[in-house]
Image: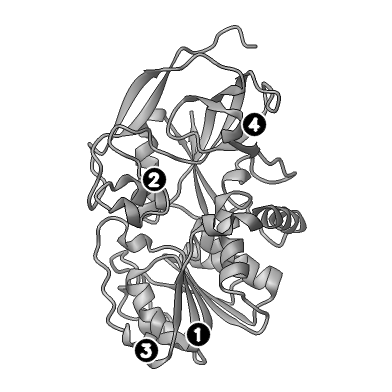
Amino acid sequence: MPASIPKTTRVIINANPPVGELKPDTFKVEERPLPELQEGQVLVKVLALGNEPAQRNWLDTSIDERRLYAPPIRKGDVVRSPAIGEVLASKSGKWKEGQRVTGFFGWTEYAVVKEEEITREAANVKGQSEWISLGALGLTGLTAWAGAFDVCHIKPEHTVLVSGAAGAVGSAFVQIAKNVVGCAKVVGVAGGKEKCDWVKKLGADECLDYKVGDTSKRGEVPQPVAPISGDSPDFEKNLKAALPDYADVFFDNVGGKVLDLGLTVVKRYGFICQCGAISGYQGKPLTLEHYGEVIMNRLTIKGMILMDHVKLIPQASQELQKWVEEGKIDVTEGETVVDTKFEDVPKTFQLLFTGGNKGKLVTKLV
């Protein structure tokens, strides 16, 4: 056991539950005592945090709790978050000092947790990021796997549209659809040329940049527009040009205008998986001008949450690791790792809502 065991830890709490955009006083750093280690418990030093868009919804305590799939992060609670940590001390027969482990340790420097609260040992895959358990082999990859196989049931003959294709889940879904299933056509939607080029590098046949105008005419320089999903004046035209025969499946992570226009390019009896709606997570209202498409073309829209697919996680984990090792899922560029002082954790988290990440956003504590 280490000679010096910390007696206190800094934590970040939900100080003023947000309605609408996150504000400077939403979060607060506090110092709290650490409980003495009991049998079956371990002391973990948090090394890195995974950033999940769903955390934004957990913070909003104005939502009727009966409508939530997970408990809210109430006022005064430590912000819940997946993390990778190192076991500093252990009174557990399962976990040893020095092991790197994963779990929902939250926004804290140290945590005393029960052995069953640790999800698993952090993955160590040769040639891959040390934080892969927060991304492709964590909630991100598992969500994409469940979306692809247990919700969308994608097949080789399918044409698939993926929004948020440069995000953590979207980029994993693109690779599963093209490199594993071998879908006939995969079209991504992302913000910015760099991100779109990366999505095509991952395997997408096309990637549409919602931030620029029509790029089909030679010699014209595309003009940037406000980075609001789908508000480019030419996005609708480019979307329809990319899908002249429509999409069988639309895997949506964005909501808002992208979802609204996506309704117009899903074929009759097509399927839409609503995995996320990040464009509205900061209080922006959802307006659907084309919702009549659902009726006219008998579309199916289904929301998904990973916890509905927990029985399949062992299979998904095994297959995801195999595909990473085979190079079918590439995460060497699929992370945005931000070295972050503890007090700046909220600032890094908010990069999720400004398009500041490519692939998984990881907060590395320094």
Chain-order first, disc 2 or disc 4: 2
Whether the residues at callouts 2 and 3 have beta carbons within 8 Å, the answer is no
Q: Foreground mark, 2 or 1?
A: 2
Q: Quadrant of the N terminus?
A: top right
Whether the residues at callouts 4 and 3 have beta carbons within 8 Å, the answer is no
Amino acid type shown at disc 2: Pro
Determine the residue positioned at 63% across, 50% down.
137
Q: Foreground mark, 3 or 1?
A: 3
Query: What label does residue 71 carry, if any?
Result: 2
* Residue 309 seen in the figure: yes
Secondary structure state at the residue bearing disc 2: loop
| x, y percent for residue 260 | 34, 78
Chain-order first, disc 2 or disc 1: 2
Crowding at mark 1 (Cα within 10 Å: few <14, some 14-19, many 20+): some
Q: Is residue 328 left or right of residue 359?
A: right
| x, y percent for residue 47 | 54, 31
Amino acid type shown at disc 4: Arg
Crowding at mark 4 (Cα within 10 Å: few <14, some 14-19, many 20+): many
Query: What label does residue 100 carry, if any?
Result: 4
Amino acid type shown at disc 1: Gly
Reading the image, the residue beneath label 1 is: 270
Q: Foreground mark, 2 or 3?
A: 2
* The quadrant where residue 221 appears: bottom left
Reading the image, the residue beneath label 3 is: 295
Secondary structure state at the residue bearing disc 3: helix
Crowding at mark 3 (Cα within 10 Å: few <14, some 14-19, many 20+): few
- Marks 2 and 1 sit apart, C-alpha to C-alpha, by 33 Å
Determine the residue positioned at 39% across, 23% down.
10
The relative height of residue 211 versus residue 76 in the rendered view (above or below) is below
Whether the residues at callouts 3 and 1 have beta carbons within 8 Å, the answer is no
